Amino acid sequence: MKTEIFKVGGMNCASCAAKVEKALRDVAGVAEVSVNAATGRALCTFDPRQTSADRLAAAVKAAGYSMEKPQHAPSGAAPWWRSPWWPVAVVAALIGAGWGLRSDPLLVGATALAAYPIIWGALKRLARREISAEVLVATGVIASASIGEFLAAAEVALIMRLGDLLENYTIERCRRSIGSLLEHMPLTARVRRGQQEQEVPVEEVAAGDLCIVRPGENIPVDGVVESGRSAVNQAAITGESAFVDKAAGDEVFSGTLNVSGALIVRATRAAAESTLARIAALVEAAQQRAAPIQRTLDRWAGWMVPLMIALALLTLAFTHDIVRAITVLIVACPCALVLATPTAMVAAIARAAREGVLIKGGQYLEAAARLKAVVFDKTGTLTRGEPSVTDVKRFCPEHNESELIALAAVAEKMSEHPVGRAVVQHADSMRLPVPDPAAFQAHHGEGVSAEVNGQRVLVGKRSLLEKHDVALAQEHRAHLEAHNEHGHTTLMVAHDGRVCGAICVSDEPRARAEDAVAELRRLAIEKIVMLTGDQPRVARSIATRVGIEHVEANVMPEHKAARIESLRQAHGAVAMVGDGVNDAPALATADLGVAMGVSGTDAAHDAADIALIADDLSKVAFAVGLSRHTLRIIRQGLAFSLLFNVAMISTAMHGVVSLIGGAMAHQVSSLVVILNAMRLLRYGKPRRH
Ligand code: ADP
Ligand code: MG
């Protein structure tokens, strides 16, 4: 399956998006389609063996719209003679001259020039027996020209064109604010090949190439530092401008700023696959996925247009005043209503991305705004996920301490769990050899088993040992309880059916975990829960330190999803915040799955609805706040446009507004809704004085 974003031309209003969507969906091999009338983009997931971008474009063309792949290359400003404002300026001049000279031919010319794209679009719709906003406007323009109201016809056409241009301009500005995520990616990279240093376009850097990054330059690719030492500003990716120290072995990301020293970086991915490029693609795709509110509105607009035509006909029947009927037609178009939701969502998603919060679609904004409970995973989420070994205890005489650690490290070598990595790191720091294990198996939420020198080694919780018929003596149990009390996770090590040691690992809570929990509480989230597979005492100790009261411990990974479900039943919408290790099903079950960290596993990023690029838990509260604000803005837009439409229709029916006044009011209402939504781009930013 392949997902691509296309630019769709000719979608002016209301029901167009639904028609393009249907046209795409009817093509064989298309799995998912989402069309956004506000941004003029279509997102399409299709099977490249069954269909192609060209075939999709053809289907859309047959439905009366155009479709092409948007150009991602940094496009220079268009030359001035290509500016879309030209025709508008010419029309305005013609109207001025026509009015001054009282020359009808000039006015007719102006009308034709301004109205031709509208009329052409309307004719294409009518040919397919469809009615859209363009049909309303075109009818209005033609009707007023035919009764000799040339000035009115020209002015209405001009206002419509002007309004469309302003709308596009505003939305384009919002889109650019996302595109600018990529602006941090340098266009060239300095690559060392053999003895030579060359400056090459960044697209030509391949995995394995060595790039030299001087102080003050952006890092061109994702990679690992080979040598050098520097402070790096990762704000482009994480939204946080605190400097991070980087030295040999550390991971660096494309688009981040190398501040102080020179770094030699070995590329791990091509530029096109970099984290930054993935983020930009993800955000663009997210903006495509329409929210549920929006879908119902599109349908609404579909029957509103016929209703408005009926109202106009009624006006004509009662008043015999054709200009009045036309005015009703024009003010009745529900454009502002249809724009309210998608524009706010597009702006909110763009704003969140700037903060390192990737919201994968508009519907997740709605979910985040409704949250009643937030569940946190412990290891790697509330804690830093970088535990270290704090204590090693031997229980049998055959192994000395090094041998015990080496044994556990071999068994843990393939584990992705943070506690497993801690054991392996400890062995590394003692310079113990850690060969690959045979028959490795991860027992999620309990530990690991593996074969070392033909004998079974178990590392993990008491329950894991007991399941494998390894009995714990009184001495072992006492040790476990004593250490759990201090919030240290204790891993039992069994070799050949006998307990031979215990390794304590401890993990610190994240720096701002406590603040993050407090912020959520301030947002009146009813229930904040820690959900963990660890022992209750360990869990409680960490929970107390971050300010969480409700702890559910000893929960197996497969039961985490069920716990989420019962919380949902008790409280309402639930968010699950996790790092993806052992909690991907819970992330997927929750009303809102939030995954942490760029370094988070891919399964988590797929299962999550919101991905936090930085490991900063306070972004959960930011997302909730932003979402609530977005819904507020959407409601304002809907209420305003609805009231405005109703008020304008009734005044138009009473003949209080002129045709031109109606056209202007109609365009102004769309602009008001759009500009209100654009306020979201500044959400949470300190006010400039
Ligand atoms: P959490 O919910 O805190 O993220 P998990 O469900 O991933 O915890 O794991 C629960 C417990 O299982 C851990 O606290 C640890 O005791 C044990 N465990 C999990 N994976 C391993 C492993 N690879 N090695 C040893 N113990 C493990
Ligand atoms: Mg975890």
Image: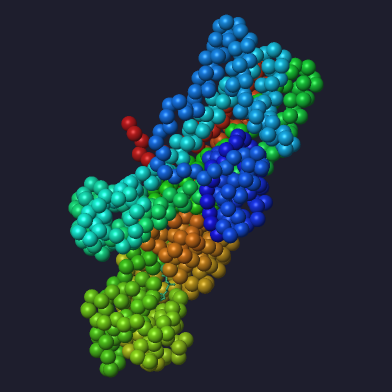
Q: Which residue: 57% across, 5% down?
A: 101
Q: Position of residue 242 (x, y in %)?
A: 28, 51
- Compared across the picture, whether 293 is left or right of 554 comes to right
Q: Which residue: 35% across, 85% down?
A: 493
Taking depth in this image into account, of 171 and 468 the one nearest to the observer is 171
Q: Which residue: 36% across, 83% down?
A: 437
Taking depth in this image into account, of 18 and 533 the one nearest to the observer is 18
- Farthest residue to the top: give it: 101
Tell me where residue 420 sits by quadrant. Answer: bottom left
- Farthest residue to the right: give it: 317
Tell me where residue 153 sits by quadrant. Answer: top right
- Compared across the picture, whether 342 is left or right of 130 comes to left
For residue 49, say whether it is visible: yes
- Compared across the picture, whether 483 is left or right of 369 comes to left
Q: Is residue 683 above or below residue 451?
A: above
User: Which color scheme did the rendering employ for the protein?
Assistant: rainbow
Q: Which quadrant holds the C terminus?
A: top left
Q: Position of residue 141 (x, y in %)?
A: 66, 21
Taking depth in this image into account, of 41 and 414 the one nearest to the observer is 41
Taking depth in this image into account, of 223 and 587 the one nearest to the observer is 223
Q: Is residue 688 above or below residue 547?
A: above
Q: Which residue: 34% across, 61% down?
A: 207
Q: Is residue 183 above or below residue 430?
A: above
For residue 654, say whether it is visible: no
